Image (cartoon, rainbow, N blue to C red):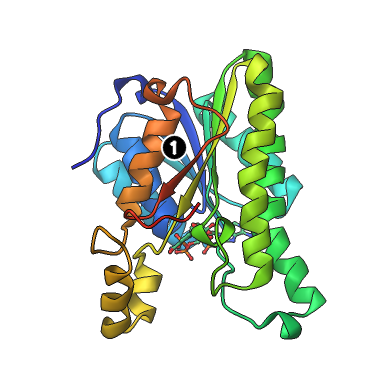
Amino acid sequence: MGGSYSDLAGKVVVVTGGSRGIGAETAREFAAQGARVCVVGRDGGALDGVVEGISKDGGAAVAVIADVTDSGALERVREETEARFGPVDVVAAFAGGQGFPVPSAELTEERWREVIDSDLTSAFLTVRTFLAGMAERGSGAFILMSSAAGRQPSLANLAYGAANAGVVMMARHLAREVGPKGVRVNCIAPSAILTEKVEAMMPGEIKERVAADHPLGRIGTPGDVAQAALFLASEAGGYLSGITIDVAGGKITN
Ligand SMILES: NC(=O)c1ccc[n+]([C@@H]2O[C@H](COP(=O)([O-])OP(=O)(O)OC[C@H]3O[C@@H](n4cnc5c(N)ncnc54)[C@H](OP(=O)(O)O)[C@@H]3O)[C@@H](O)[C@H]2O)c1
């Protein structure tokens, strides 16, 4: 059962990583609150599926295909969203997810750069694309995506841990810098979340072990993360900036 945030109705929300997993569910939840949503990813077919689902439920959404490591592509996202819905109020920068474990001695320079690009530089470029407009209008909210792997050492690769720790600091730094302009920047750091991909990849017995490793006794869902995003975007979270919400089922990850 989700929360209800009437102030989100009519808001223009960009969700990167909106083609699947956590981002897709977050896009659906924003649309269910009456927000107008731009879903961003690289897989056009998957994006169209998300938009169709939202439209069928009576919501408003548009898809823009873009690689979030490319600032030119992000600029196109901004232009196309503004042309369709008007100025952007909320950006959920959720694209990424390159945590696959690699022993650090075997982590190539190329792979390091790819992960940093995908999970850290993408967040910076996404913020930079929308920040000036929000600051000019004197309002806006960013929700950045980190991970439990950016809060505590984990089995994920070193670059992913470093990138996600960087995202936490990005939110803190930006909150201080752009708060006076009316822009809030927060972050979410999920522990294990059962997306379609994780569901398909994780054997049942491992799922049980991961669930038991969380005090609330289950693995998180994309909906759990989406609810935190709605709260941070809404006026209910209006005095929060620079914080990271650990969506982690009671596991202490910070
Ligand atoms: N699932 C978890 O347990 C978990 C835990 C902690 C943090 N997270 C974080 O949550 C975020 C979403 O993860 P998820 O589990 O939902 O992953 P997912 O199911 O693999 O989805 C990843 C999403 O990010 C998009 N994406 C990735 N790189 C992109 C790029 N360069 N340009 C544009 N879009 C890109 C993908 O779009 P396309 O496929 O269309 O390219 C897809 O929509 C990630 O940042 C991940 O690090 C996940």
Residue at 71% across, 44% down = 125
Mark 1 near ligand 1 (CB under 8 Å)? no
In the rendered image, the vertical position of residue 243 relative to residue 65, given as above or below: above
Residue at 67% across, 58% down = 163
Q: Position of residue 134 (x, y in %)?
A: 63, 22
In the rendered image, the vertical position of residue 93 relative to residue 7, given as above or below: below
Instruction: Give the amino acid type for the residue marked by disc 1 in the picture.
Output: Val
Q: Position of residue 33 (x, y in %)?
A: 30, 31
**Residue at the extreme right of the image, as rendered:** 109
| Whether residue 192 can be seen here | yes
Q: Which of the pair 150/17 is nearer the observer?
A: 150
Relative to 85, is 110 on the left or the right?
Answer: right
Identify the image quadrant of residue 213: bottom left
Residue at 72% across, 59% down = 117
Relative to 87, is 37 on the left or the right?
Answer: left
Residue at 73% across, 75% down = 111
Q: Which of the pair 96/178 is nearer the observer?
A: 178
The number of discs equals 1
| Whether residue 67 can be seen here | no
Identify the image quadrant of residue 192: bottom left
Q: Secondary structure at mark 1?
A: strand
Relative to 190, is 134 on the left or the right?
Answer: right
Relative to 235, is 140 on the left or the right?
Answer: right
Q: Position of residue 69 (x, y in %)?
A: 70, 55
Q: Which residue is mark 1?
A: 37
